[in-house]
Image (cartoon, rainbow, N blue to C red):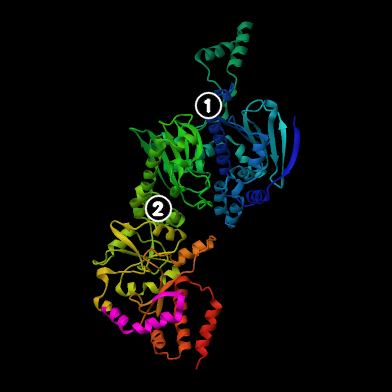
Amino acid sequence: MTENTEKRGFQTEVKQLLSLLANSLYSNKEVFLRELISNASDAIDKLRFKAVQDQSVYGNDSNLHIRLSADKDKKTLTISDNGIGMTRDQICEHLGTIAKSGTAEFFKNLSGDQARDSQLIGQFGVGFYSAFIVADKVTVISRSAEAAPDQAVCWESDGTGEYTVSTVTKADRGTDVILSLKEEDTEYLEDWTLRSAVTKYSDHISVPVEMLETVKPEKKDDDKKDDAENKDENKDENKDENKDEKEAETAEYTEWKQINEAKALWTRSAKDITDDEYKEFYKHISHDYDDPLVWAHNHVEGAQEYTSLLYVPKHAPWDLFNREQKHGLKLYVQRVFIMDDAEQFMPGYLRFIKGVLDSNDLPLNVSREILQDSKLTSKLKSGCTKKALQMLSKMAKDENQDNYKTFWKEYGSVIKEGLVEDYENREEIFDLIRFASTHNDSSEQNVSLQDYISRMPEKQKNIYFLTAATYAAAASSPYLETFKKKGIEVLLLTERVDEWVMNQVTEYKEKKFISVTASDLDLGELEDKEEKEKQENQAKENEDFLKKVKEALGEQVTDVKVTNRLTDTPSCVIGQGNQMMTAQMRRLLEASGQKLPDEKYTLEINMDHDLVKQLAAETDENRFKDWAQLILDEAILADQGALKEPARYVKLVNSLLLHK
């Protein structure tokens, strides 16, 4: 009997999702069972955690399980659990919306590619809706562990635009998900189909998955003897009565039988676990439809005893750069689930790592507050971090670099954060970093610092780099001219995080990082003595000319010098000091709304360039100022990619071009 029935409309995005599930995702339909069993397992884990502090939540039902029931007459498949259950508010919250804040991003990532789109379902917390792949109606009956029998909730939908919620009576706590199967999907009512799917996808979970099994006891020897005697027509009536009793004792009956191993996978020896089992366990804990990129299973004994099973997803989550979004490992203490997203055990730059941590040393009643200040937590975090970096390092050294290329494309920007955040492991992180460089005619980031150092000329003592907004801007930058001429490789950094990182790190293996735009750029022994003398002579010979250019440009520049870094370009601008704020950094800060003072530059000019020679030969004072301004604007444009007054620049160019 139902009461307090109300009809509600789905969130708009849910309607789109249900249409996608019902009409598009035909391949690998059986994953719906994995998702629903996984949800049931989570509900039981949450009940176990609650029971750590309050055993009374078990009531008289402490035998935790998930059960599959098929009714061929009604064409329904029911997935039941006796976990923590849901209240009316929880059902409306979780079954009426998609992953809360992830809704818009989910649909932003839809591509129309069915295979790829199906992989997004788990990432955005919408695994429950996979039920509509095989069902044209789904009914959920749930009773919270804290609710009375007459306060259970029934949620029902046919997967179109609405769902109903009503109050019902349910004798036991937990949740029943009842699928009214589509005609073409009634194969999921067959025992062998269900057993096969459970073995494939859910064998590793720590909760027993049970199905009803028909049992027909074997006859004992004395039963067989009685049967033989009963065939004798001369036996008395007592024999007939005994026969009836024996038949009753040997009648067929049904009982719940466990069909999965139900042993937590991470507690087993690594040598006994297949790759397929590792992959399916990853999908269970992450709700990802794709295989992981790589994983590491470790058991540590000694001062601390813990087991970690860490995975790197093949694709970055949509909220990778939202540092406020929950991340972390599933925490267990002595095989008892404690919490999801325990971020205390993995640093921020490894927030994409998924997995399980099971500690024998933490107390069962551990909370997030206790974890924040625990010395043991700090040690566990250090251990997990090192294991994760070792896993990545092993992948980076693999002869087949396909996996690492995929990894770097997805997570490279995040890994760079570790160079600033994790000083203890900075060298290990540096070995993971990949760069674009002038060594290759490609924007692909595939150069390691070891590669760079191995190609350094004998006299080179430093590592040179250039930051820019794009690879194209970096590769064509005038600041590279003298480096290309001398055959010196330069790292090209074009990601937003690079500016922040390179302002924080100074060296790698006793080799300093030097920006090619530094005002006091010194190439040391790489400097050509003849070129150095030529530069000094030109500076002396053109002292009056340089002074005149500075006066023409006024407060726009702090100085005008002869350059030693240009070969094909007339000029470039240099900021103040070696650690100056680069043009890229200014753009980032201004884009964030920060007001910055106007930049004052040193203008460096190439006295061998024809444009500079024309400027030096100009006798008309006004035209001299125009040419000087043009040379400065060109330098700023090459450095920053934009001018504050582009219309003025265009007018200036037109004026000089049309002058006869």
Q: Is residue 314 magenta?
A: no
Residue type of the residue flagged with mark 1: Gln
Prevailing secondary structure of the magenta residues: helix
Q: Is residue 543 magenta?
A: yes
Which label's residue is closer to the chain start, 2 or 1? 1
Within 10 Å of disc 1 (Cα), the crowding (few <14, some 14-19, many 20+) is few
Residue 201 visible in the displayed image: yes
Q: Position of residue 206 (x, y in %)?
A: 49, 32
Q: Residue 111 carries which label?
A: none
Q: Which residue bears the numbered disc 2?
A: 420
Q: Which quadrant of the figure has residue 303?
A: top left
Q: In this view, does 646 lie above or below 357?
A: below
Residue 135 shown left or right of residue 460 in the figure: right
Which is more toward the observer, 528 or 476?
528
Q: Which mark is residue 53?
A: 1
Residue 535 shown left or right of residue 317 in the figure: left
- Could you tell me how far apart the alpha carbons at marks 2 and 1 are, in whole angstroms? 40 Å
Tell me the magenta residue range: 533-559
Q: Quadrant of the N terminus?
A: top right
Residue type of the residue flagged with mark 2: Val
- Which SS class for mark 2? helix
Q: Which residue is drawn at 53% across and 33% down?
A: 45
Q: Given the current orientation, which residue lies at the most extreme bottom position?
A: 660
Q: Position of residue 200 (x, y in %)?
A: 50, 40
Which is more toward the observer, 519 or 53?
519
